[in-house]
Amino acid sequence: MTGYDSLAREEIEATITRAGFEQLYPEAVSVEITDSFGRKLGECRAVASSDGEPTGDYEIRIARRLFEGDDDDTWRDTVRHEVAHAYVLDTVGSHAQPHGDEWKAAARRAGADPVARCEGDETVDATYVLACPNGCFERGYLQRTDRVKQPWQYTCDGCGTQPISYDVGERPVDPDPGTCYMASLPWRTRSDRDDGDDRHSSARYLLACSNGCTTWPYQRRTKRIKNPWLYSCPECEETLLSCDIDDHPIDLAPGRCHVASIPWQEPRLVHACPNGCFSVGHGQHTDESRHPERYRCEECGTQTVVYPADDRPESLDPGTNYVD
């Protein structure tokens, strides 16, 4: 057994124990580390006998490339993901939906992200999710496809409701059908995409791509105008910029606020997790940055911090405001 096989085997046994999958015996689950996957991360299949009858054994295969970087979280999550499949096959049977309610419940018990990470027919490490707000389906995507950028153009096959899209791990509470909740996009609805906040000729500002892909006019100095570096072009992925209505975006640097009446061009303060899970730059204070002790990192649960963008402290004490 190779080193990677041993790591996966240890994680399989730990997952079965942690999740309380008492009906699934560790010795019934074999593991193979493979180079044969393209974009697929892993798979689980029931092992059949020579006459096609189920044997009660399962084979989990994991892409070798997942072990070759420094990110242990990805291969561990993939192993847990596949162990959850083995448990569902063992307890529910092959008729269970691959990423249905039974699997989601098992994935949560296993400590895996309960998102069906697929694009087309292949499993990938999802970044975005397209889902029915009524729970009929949930599908992960690696790239910002038209489906996740414009969910209002589609309907759920099960209930006819317009789906929603959002960043993995950031499913909104009580979402509105047909809404895009992805943080990096400068719109949420069809009207946002088509019109910014202005449908007339009175716009004073632009949110734009420096490559000339598109522009959105705004009447007010909204969060998007004040903090354009938080968003990226849905066409070319370039960080957006903001400017006055008479400026020419293609002549301006991306990721900056070029509005003459706003006293900053780049982030002046950073709201972040002291453990490095996330960091978000802002031009001015928000409630999160004024009171970081009130907020916790969604990934690790640590109190957040805020510090000047150009003067990050060497050590960060949770819950500390280093700006005021």
Image (cartoon, rainbow, N blue to C red):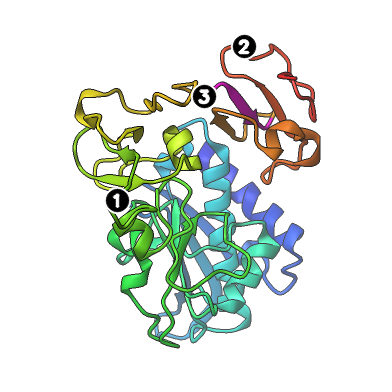
Q: Earlier in the sequence, mark 2 or mark 3?
A: 3
Tell which tag, 2 or 3, sits nearer the viewer.
3
Whether the magenta-drawn stretch holds residue 33 is answered as no
Question: Alpha-carbon neighbours of circle 1 within 10 Å: few (<14), some, or many (≥20)?
Answer: few
Circles 2 and 3: CB distance less than 8 Å? no
At label 2, the amino acid type is Asp
Residue at mark 1: 38
- Per the image, label 1 sits on a secondary structure element best described as loop
At label 1, the amino acid type is Gly
Question: Is residue 276 or residue 113 the one in the foreground?
Answer: 276
Q: Which residues are magenta?
A: 267-273
Question: Alpha-carbon neighbours of circle 3 within 10 Å: few (<14), some, or many (≥20)?
Answer: many
Residue at mark 3: 267
On the image, the x and y values in percent for residue 264 come to 48, 21
Outermost residue, front direction?
202
On the image, the x and y values in percent for residue 231 come to 41, 40
Question: Above or below — where is 69 with respect to 113?
Answer: above
At label 3, the amino acid type is Pro
How far, Cα to Cα, is label 2 from label 3? 12 Å
- Per the image, label 3 sits on a secondary structure element best described as loop
In the drawing, what numbered circle is on residue 3?
none
How far, Cα to Cα, is label 1 from label 3? 39 Å
Circles 1 and 2: CB distance less than 8 Å? no
On the image, the x and y values in percent for residue 59 come to 49, 64
On the rendered image, what quadrant is the C terminus found in? Answer: top right
Side of 83 relative to 59 (left or right): right
Circles 1 and 3: CB distance less than 8 Å? no
Residue at mark 2: 311
- Per the image, label 2 sits on a secondary structure element best described as loop
Tell which tag, 1 or 3, sits nearer the viewer.
3
Tell which tag, 1 or 2, sits nearer the viewer.
2
